[in-house]
Amino acid sequence: MKPPAVNAGFSGLQTRDHLELVTWMRRFRRGGGLDRLAPASGAAVHAAVEHLYEAHVWVCDRFGGAVEPSLLMEQAAQDGERPESGVAAARRLARQRLGHLTPADTA
């Protein structure tokens, strides 16, 4: 996911569909709407996002993300910090975002 395969500075947030997904996930933080869905619909949203992150981790790992820093963590490496791998970053984001998608009364 680096040049020459993609443009320099590539981020998934540069794509409209990814930005839209993240925007909605932020809106759905606990108490932000998911709790108004029927339980089966909320479970379906949670399962779909969980599957999305499993696929993200798989792709990241396939392209060296188990040992390479995530694109967003490369700056930390340049600043002298120990960056987390792309896979670790994707798993951390999955835990955080899936937590946001869990209705407050079941968290």
Image: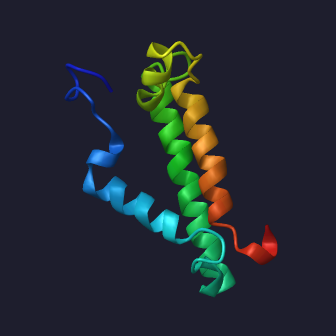
Q: Is residue 73 above or below residue 56?
A: above
Q: List x then y, in percent, for residue 73.
A: 48, 27
Q: Residue at x 26, y 50 (%)?
A: 15
Q: Quadrant of residue 74?
A: top left
Q: Quadrant of residue 43?
A: bottom right
Q: Residue furthest right?
A: 106
Q: Residue at x 58, y 45 (%)?
A: 93
Q: Is residue 15 above or below residue 44?
A: above
Q: Residue at x 35, y 62 (%)?
A: 20
Q: Is residue 63 left or right of residue 32?
A: left
Q: List x then y, in percent, for residue 72.
A: 43, 31
Q: List x then y, in percent, for residue 29.
A: 60, 68
Front residue of this view, candidates 36 and 59: 36
Q: Is residue 14 above or below residue 86?
A: below
In which quadrant of the rendered image does the N terminus lie?
A: top left
Q: Is residue 104 left or right of residue 90?
A: right
Front residue of this view, candidates 55 and 84: 84
Q: Is residue 76 left or right of residue 98?
A: left
Q: Residue at x 29, y 22 (%)?
A: 2
Q: List x then y, in percent, for residue 102.
A: 69, 67
Front residue of this view, candidates 36 and 51: 36
